[in-house]
Structure formats: structure tokens, C-alpha cells
Image (cartoon, rainbow, N blue to C red):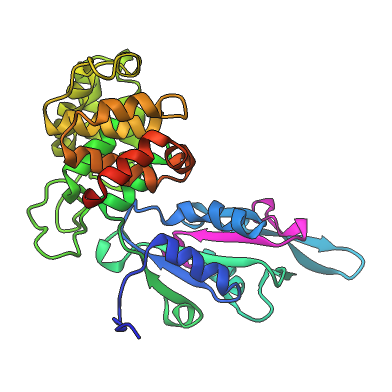
Amino acid sequence: MSEVKFGKNITLKQAASLIKNNPETRFLLQGEPGIGKSSILESIANDMGYGHAYIDVPNMDLGDIAMPVIDHDTKTTRYYPNARFKIHEQKPLVIMLDEFTKGADPVKNMLHPMLEKANPRLGDIPISKDTIVFLTGNLTTDGVGDSLKAHSRNRLVPVTISKPTAEEWIEWGINHDIQPEVLAWVNQYPQVLASYTDGGQNDNPYIYNPRKTQNAFVSPRSLATASNIVRTRKELEADTVIAALSGAIGESGARDMQAYIEFADQLPTWDATIKDPKGTKLPTSAGACAITVFGAIARIDKDTITPFMTYLERFDAEWQAVFAINIAKTPSKQSIAFSSKAFSAWVAKNQDLL
């Protein structure tokens, strides 16, 4: 039996599994800003075959939850819930009360019956027993205004979500169309996804730190934003790109990432690489090699993997291994790699690198 470590953080993947396997339990996912807590709503709903409802709690007033209507026959009033909750559809749902811990107290109170394990409801409307409800919020140490009263906390199971490591985020990014320059930068500077809760991060200029005044910082969310900016860089002036990246990930991150953009613009085209894998110029710097490798994983298909493997074999062994390991972990590319004779031959020849 493995050692149990009390207080251990869990990943988003583990949190999703916890929620799906304990549908009657109300989990509160806590973690620092921008790490993807809200992103698991749709994936949980898809896995369960349910609909889903995103509820942005801090931006709600009482009228956004339910409104009283008069029943003239009984001379009473009833609450009609807002359509955004979708409970009128009378089918199983996954409802996420996002940033619940930042909501106004009257709004929290009105949503409180949804936290009950037995007979959950919204107003006087019962919620389907199959419906899953979970909450998100930030850590109290993040200093962004989260609070929860004891009677609410006692109805919940708070779990702390860990920030993804650089390796975990790169795996996600490859599958979500993140630009290779951004993937390469994170691969080269894994400290950009460190957490302020880790030791020795006081001087880390990239990350969120509640003890510092910051206009922007690197997080999984802001890296996705940076990727969108990098994607449109050819239509923008260099100063515009830097200004936008500074606003997304902070000045330190923007200046460093700009170097990777310059590497990318100096690399041979994908078409040239595939047409002449033995003669096309090789990148020389680590940054340019990283961009080439991660860009190839995103672009490669069954027709281009063989010539690219020929090109890749001219790289240092380290970069060959980076390509092989990451393409093998990318669901959308696994079948391409594993059905390729060229890739299989490389694996057989280079097992010591894996």
C-alpha cells in the first residue's frame, strides 16, 4: 500500500474523476488563479452524457437566480428559476457554481439549497437526483476575496487543485492548438508554471504572487491568451505584439517569449522540411529546436511523418527523444506515430533514450 500524504493537492483530471464517481457530494475545487478549474465542466458533462450549466456566481444578483410569481388560484407566490440553470429541462445536468466563494452573501444564501445532499433544490424547484453540482474558488491565501461560512463549508468537500507542471501543460497544449513557440518557451522555462506556494519562488518574475503588485502573470489561462496573440503576429507590428504579450503574461514573460517568436520566423518552412528532409537547414539553438519539435507534433499526419523522421534523425538525441515522448502522449497523434514504420524503427533503435 502506498503512503498516504495528508493535505496533498490533486490534479484537474483527478478532481474530475472524484466528481463523476461521487455525484451526490458537493466538491469545492480550490486553486490559484488561471489554472483551469472552470475548464473541467464541459469534459465532465461530456463524459457523463449530461447537459451542463455554467453559473458565474460573483456576477449574479438575486433576480438572476429566480423570481417570485403569483399563483392566483392558491393566492401564493412561487419561485421561477432563471433559464441559465436549465433545471426546467428536467434532465440530468452538471452545474458548476463558478467562483462561489466570491459571491455576495444573499446570492450564496439563495443558492445554498443546491448544496444539500438530500433533496437539493433551487427555490422551491427540486433538482434532479442525477444532477451533479460542484463549486470552484480560489485559495484564501491568493488574496482575491474568497470566503465561506462554516455552515456552508460543512456541506462541502474542499479539495485543492494543483497547478499543472510544465510537462502536464505542454501535453494539454499540444492537444488544444497552442502555438509551438509558446509550447517551446514553457518547455525551456518550466519555472513559469511554478506556484507561489512552492518553496523558493519569491524571486520568480513570471508567476502569480499575492505578496506582489502585478498587472499580469503567467498561468495556464494567460498562456492560452498569449498563444492567440502569437498566432496573429504576422499581421501585427513587433511593438504591438510585445505590448499585447506584456498585458497577457507580464513584461518578463513577454520579453523572453519574443525571442522564441524571432526563432520561429527564422526557421525553414514546414513544406521545405518535408520536401527535402536531408538537405533542409537544421536549427542550431535550443529554442529553435524546441519550436521545430513541438510544431511538428501539431502539424504531422500520416503522409508527413516519414520525411519528418528523416529530418529529425539529424537532430541531437535529446530533441529526438522530446519528439517521440510527446507525440506518444498526444491522443490525436498516437495512431499516426504507432502506425508509422519510420517511427517504429526509430523507437526500436533508440529505446535507451526513452
In the image: residue 228, left or right of residue 26:
left
- Do we see residue 196 in this rendering? yes
Image height check: is 298 above or below 65?
above
> On the image, which quarter does residue 284 sit in?
top left
Residue 198 location in percent, x, y? 17, 64
In the image: residue 220, left or right of residue 38:
left
The magenta segment = 81-105
In the image: residue 85, left or right of residue 32:
right
Residue 290 location in percent, x, y? 22, 34
Q: At x 32% / y 52%, what residue is drawn?
A: 168
Between 40 and 176, the residue placed more toward the observer is 176
Q: At x 53% / y 66%, what residue is drawn?
A: 134
Q: At x 24% / y 23%, what residue is drawn?
A: 241
Residue 4 location in percent, x, y? 31, 83
Between 196 and 315, the residue placed more toward the observer is 315
Residue 315 location in percent, x, y? 18, 31
Q: At x 45% / y 29%, what residue is drawn?
A: 301
- Do we see residue 106 in this rendering? no
